[in-house]
Structures are given as C-alpha cells and as structure tokens.
Image: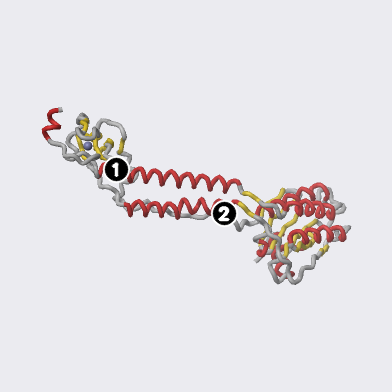
C-alpha cells in the first residue's frame, strides 16, 4: 500500500506524510528478584554513625574496612550479578545499539520497476513545458531509480465528489488505480478551475509514494521534497508550475542519496550507553561490597591494628588467628601484650 509522503497548499503551508519509520520501541527491563540488595545504599567506605565496621583481607593479606548499616547482608551470588548484567545488556545495551544502527541512513538507488515510464497527466492543463518536467524527472530517475509521475486535477475532481474525503484520499485512489506495484511516486496537484482569473489561487499538492522505496527515500527525504516543492510552487504557481517541479526535483536529486545522520538517535544511543555503563559499574561495586561485608568480620570501630612479628603485615585484632600474609600463628598472648 502506498502512503502519503506529504503535501502542501498555498494557504496552509506543507505537511509531513504518515511516518512509517523510527517508531518507538518499548523495552521492559526487570529489576530482578526482590531479595537483591543491589543499590541498597547502606555501604560506606568511612565510619559513620549507625554503621558497623567490617574488616576483610585481600589476596595479599592486607586488611580493608567497609562500613555497613543494618543487619549483616549475604554476599550476592555471582549468578545474580550475571543475570542483571545480561538483562542490562539486552535492554539498555540493546536500545543503545539499535539507536546507533538506526541513526545512520545510507540511501540506496532503487531498482527500476517493469513499467518505469514517467507519466505527466495534466488534466488541469497547467503545465506549459511538459518536456522540461519530463527531463527533470528522468534525470531524477537516473540518480535515484525512483519513477516520479505527475498528475494535475481541478479541485472539483475530488472536493466536490462524495467518493473522496480529501486530496490525499484522491491521490491514494489514483495511485492504486494507475500502478500495480509499489515502485512509483505520484504527485497530484490540484487547482481551482478559474486559476487563470481568480485573485488568490489556492493550489494544493499531495505525494503518494510506493512502499518499495524504504531503502531509498527516508521520511526525512519525503519531508525535504515536500518542502522544496511547496517553496517552489509558492514562487512559481500558477503561471510556471513546470519550473517549480523542475527546480524542486533538481535540488532534491543533488542530495537524495547522501548519507543521513539522525543526531537525536545518536544522542539517545549515547544516553543509553552511559546508563548501561554506570548501571553495570554500580552493580559490580554493590556486588563487591556485599562480598566484603558478607565475608568480613565485624569489629568495634576502635579495634587496634597490630603487626605480624614474622613479616610485619598489619592486621586488626580479633579478625584472624593466623597472619593473612605469611600464615604465622598469632597468639592471643602476643595480641594482648602489644
Ligand atoms: Zn606474617
């Protein structure tokens, strides 16, 4: 089914066609089972009132302090951390990836349809130089592979008819009656019957584009030709509609296959990338804290630091019975005497 690529009028400016790309995607990320202590916010690296001191030793036997408020938490299982990292990668990471992917649109020249004849059906008799229009559209076809056809009508063709709600409705109908594929782009232009004598000629136009141009004509490109045509008609219509079409499609052809970058999607991609990185770092820090406290020993804030008499490694009284660095036994007596 073809869809509107936008339209315009002398009185009311121009409008965009129905957008079919860049629709919103909704992802739901699970926050995980309720027993997770992730982001509990009750860890501290400094002593604070209401926080209890936990001492743990790293692989080299050096001690570290973590302060934690509330009952001693369980160390978060690695599987839980892995599950949340996978969930974040699929959701935030995935949104970021898709946003970057969709941000860059590289138009490809379309393959011509079996019937690639450019037609100009000037029922309103308003196009003087059909050859000039034909040449411009042929040049555009060479560049883009898109077959553009022009139809002009009097307003009464659709406005006075009970068959059509609007010019867009008429253009749709005309497209499906004229073409049996999705490889044409029809522009219907409508004029009042007395356009040669009336004071204010309220022309209108509507584009109807086949769906096979998905990889050639982006919705931004549709908006661009709608605006180009509207601007040209404002200057040339109704006397030189031919010049308006030629100028609009000449300009359009210059850029129609240029790479388009959607900067909003680039920004969205970076926002979700940073959210992803910060969330993962936060969860990893929480995971490590829970292990430090879960495997640590609760001691008073003023518990003394002593040194192993064999290797000199520092430890906290009441947390170990052997030196965590050299393994030498630490006697109770030794701890009391110092
Ligand atoms: Zn030691």
Q: Residue at x 63, y 49 (%)?
A: 261
Q: Is mark 1 within 8 Å of ligand 1?
A: no
Tags 1 and 2 in contact by the CB under 8 Å rule?
no
Q: Where the C terminus falls, by quadrant? A: top left
SS at badge 2: helix
Give above or below for 226 relative to 209: above
Which residue is at a point 68% across and 67% down the rendered structure image?
A: 182
Residue 162 can be seen in this image:
no
Tell me the crowding category of disc 1: few under 14, some 14 to 19, or many 20 or more residues within 10 angstroms, Cα based. few
Instruction: Give the quadrant of residue 292.
Output: top left
Q: Is residue 334 left or right of residue 171?
A: left
Q: Mark 1 = which residue?
A: 59
Relative image position of residue 181 (x, y in whole percent):
69, 70
Label whose residue precedes the other's in the sequence (1 or 2): 1
Front residue of 4/10: it is: 4
Residue 145: percent from the left, percent from the top?
74, 62
Separation of marks 1 and 2 at Cα, in angstroms: 43 Å
Q: In what quadrant does ligand 1 lie?
A: top left
Q: Is residue 265 above or below residue 121?
A: above
Q: Is residue 44 visible?
A: yes
At which x and y percent is residue 73?
25, 44
Quarter of the image where one finds residue 282? top left
Q: Which mark is residue 101?
A: 2
45 relative to 263 in the view: left or right? left
- Residue appearing at x 31%, y 34% in the figure: 45
- Depth order, front residue of 295/59: 59
Give the farthest residue toward the top. Answer: 338
> For this rendering, which residue is in front, 126 or 86?
86
């Amino acid at each position: 089914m073809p869809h509107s690529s936008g339209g315009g009028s002398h009185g009311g400016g121009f409008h965009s066609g129905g957008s079919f790309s860049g629709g919103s995607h909704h992802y739901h990320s699970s926050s995980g089972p309720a027993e997770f202590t992730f982001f509990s916010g009750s860890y501290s690296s400094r002593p604070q009132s209401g926080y209890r001191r936990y001492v743990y030793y790293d692989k080299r036997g050096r001690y570290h302090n973590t302060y934690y408020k509330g009952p001693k938490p369980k160390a978060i299982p690695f599987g839980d951390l892995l599950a949340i990292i996978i969930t974040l990668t699929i959701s935030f990471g995935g949104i970021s990836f898709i946003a970057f992917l969709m941000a860059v649109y590289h138009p490809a020249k379309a393959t011509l349809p079996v019937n690639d004849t450019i037609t100009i059906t000037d029922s309103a008799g308003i196009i003087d130089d059909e050859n000039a229009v034909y040449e411009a559209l042929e040049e555009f076809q060479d560049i883009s592979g898109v077959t553009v056809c022009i139809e002009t009508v009097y307003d009464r063709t659709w406005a006075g008819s009970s068959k059509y709600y609007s010019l867009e409705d008429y253009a749709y109908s005309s497209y499906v009656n004229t073409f049996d594929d999705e490889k044409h782009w029809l522009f219907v232009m409508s004029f009042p019957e007395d356009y040669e004598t009336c004071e204010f000629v309220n022309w209108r136009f509507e584009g109807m584009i086949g769906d096979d141009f998905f990889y050639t004509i982006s919705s931004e490109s549709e908006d661009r030709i709608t605006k180009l045509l509207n601007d040209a008609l404002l200057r040339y219509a109704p006397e030189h509609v031919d010049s308006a079409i030629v100028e609009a499609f000449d300009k359009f052809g210059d850029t129609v296959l240029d790479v388009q970058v959607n900067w909003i999607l680039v920004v969205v991609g970076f926002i979700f990338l940073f959210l992803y990185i910060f969330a993962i770092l936060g969860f990893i820090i929480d995971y490590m804290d829970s292990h430090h406290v879960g495997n640590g020993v609760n001691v008073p804030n003023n518990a003394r630091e002593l040194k192993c008499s064999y290797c000199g490694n520092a430890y906290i009284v009441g947390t170990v019975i052997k030196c965590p660095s050299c393994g030498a036994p630490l006697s109770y007596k030794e701890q009391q005497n110092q």
